[in-house]
Amino acid sequence: MTWIIIGVFYSLENLMQLQEIIRHHWGIEELRPLQTPAISAVIERRNSLVVLPTGGGKSLCYQAPAVYLGGTTVVISPLISLMKDQVDGLRACGVAASQLDSSQTAEEKRTLLSDLKQGRINLLFVSPERMSQPDFCDLLKQVDVRTFAIDEAHCISHWGHDFRPEYRQLSKLKEIFPECSIHAYTATATQQVRDDIIKQLNLTNAEVLVGNFDRPNLTYRVTPRRELLKQVTDVIARYPKDGGIIYCIRRSDVDELTKKLKARGISALPYHAGLSNEQRAKAQDAFLEEKCNVIVATVAFGMGIDRSNVRYVMHTGMPKSLEHYQQETGRAGRDGLDAECLLFHSGADFFTWKSIIEKSASELDNGSDFIESSMDHLREMDRYCRSAACRHYTLVRYFGQEPGFSSCNACDLCLGETSVLEDSMTVAKKIISCVYRVNQRFGIKHVVSVLRGMHSDQIKKFNHEALSTFGILKDQSEDNLRDWIYQLIGQNALAQEEIEGWGGQTYPILKLTRESAEVLKDQRDVRLLRPVEKKKQRRSSSANLPESPTDANLFEILRALRRRIASEKRVAPYLIFSDATLKEIARVKPSSLLEMRRISGVGDIKLRDYGDEFLEAVVNFN
């Protein structure tokens, strides 16, 4: 393990002690990039902002120093479920951790507060609302609190993707606890959001550490949404024993898709804000405990999800920002093994979100700044969906980093699953000409019908079968033409404008833009994408372990054992051992506890608690 402690000088003995703490509790032999300086900042009591992608090891950056330094570190977390998972995980590693929340009984709270005063808690998890209570702050002043760690710190920023007003109250932390160091952690934050976090928390001279936003173990795919149910079930069929999350834009979409999946024998559960707290808790627990592998949800589901072995995340509609997309897809492959992220996209998604944003702004009385900022995020997301550039490259650039590659070999574009239409300019000119010929008075459906030469009543009514563009693209499918029109809108070569029709209802019509004329005059290039059948094999992730049929069989036996133990202890299975650890056990096939201890993720406490049972399973398999 390479250790670089900056600032204050530490003796070799100190470094060895810290190294042994991490090895003992977490079974980790080597730290990931930026974990060493992030841990150093906490030990040296220097304020810090740490931005590491999901699965990058943010939690260890404040958990390990809490054990090393002693005293109590207060962790501020937004959700009770998220606190519970972290506390369960720490206790499984032999770390003294507790949470204080509204679901606890008076007796439980009295016991916890007594332990806190006696110095028996290394990490105390609380909500931002709890930190706004003067009595609680007075209590913390009486105990040995040295450090505050703020999880999901992007929630404090108006410019972030998940702003929460209660996080703004944390701006007083420095004033109330001037001697304590404050450390903010998040997985997704642009430069603007990072600056705002530092400003809001008054983090003077803060150490700012930003990790690589690329997640090389994830394969990104953006596909036109056509036969959605078939598209979704095809993905689920590829992962019959693995967990996955399916995101929908609206609650009604969640309920409808869940019903259809259940009708096909797929055990899926819904999750959205319209369900009761009890229903949501049951769905989340079933997913975390691997009693249900498919969750269909709105974005209300996610922040509290720490299940490390999610093998796919599907979006049935476009997310409303790249920050949301990065955060939501980041729930796949947290264990470092390969995972898949699929986005089924339609150009109509932009207008669905536009309507939702405008309605939300009206109801909450948000100003024009909110709407404009939200629309900027939405337009950026829409461009990503229509882009012909590498998905990994685009995401890394968006978060302000320069990628070290131009082709990732782990997205639909780099794998050759999507290609640029060779005669893009010719097709684009024909579509734009058709919009002009129908006098910019009709929507996509009608323009597509004219291009395909359909003899509908609507076309006959307006005599559009006499147009020169009638049937000019009759060899193309309705789906292709519709998708290409949306791509032209995304490249500003066409526009949509809502007009009012009969009965006060509005509907969108296609309009020409300045860029439309430039395309017709060959003064502007456009590129139209289309899916192709032939697929290359994605790159092999360095985190993916080689797996023979024998290893795979043993892995399933170990997973079954993990589920049984987790059920007995009433914790999530991944808190026993991660999939990555089980795969390594299946590959190495240790013949002794000493050999098992050398496997990453097997610390002394877990070896003591679970080693014998897992070793017996390996020996019996051999």
Image (tube, grey):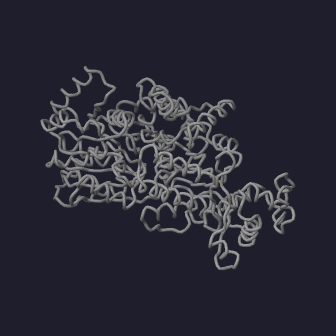
Q: Residue at the left extreme?
A: 142
Query: For this rendering, which residue is in front, 489 or 557?
Result: 489
Tell me residue 365's x, y (percent): 41, 46
Residue 62 falls left or right of residue 326 = left
Task: Please tell me which residue is depicted at 57% across the width and 51% down the height of the picture.
Answer: 318
Query: For this rendering, which residue is in front, 336 or 331?
Result: 331
Tell me residue 234's x, y (percent): 68, 43
Q: Is residue 351 above or below residue 425?
A: above
Task: Please tell me which residue is depicted at 36% across the width and 61% down the height of the picture.
Answer: 192
Question: Which quarter of the rendering shows the C terminus?
Answer: top right
Query: For this rendering, which residue is in front, 565 or 548?
Result: 565
Tell me residue 24's x, y (percent): 30, 41
Tell me residue 159's x, y (percent): 39, 55
Q: Is residue 537 above or below residue 467?
A: above
Could you tell me if residue 167 is visible in this image? yes
| Residue 41 image-quadrant placement | bottom left
Residue 266 falls left or right of residue 133 = right
Query: For this rendering, which residue is in front, 621 or 139?
Result: 139
Residue 456 falls left or right of residue 505 = right
Question: Which quarter of the rendering shows the N terminus?
Answer: bottom left
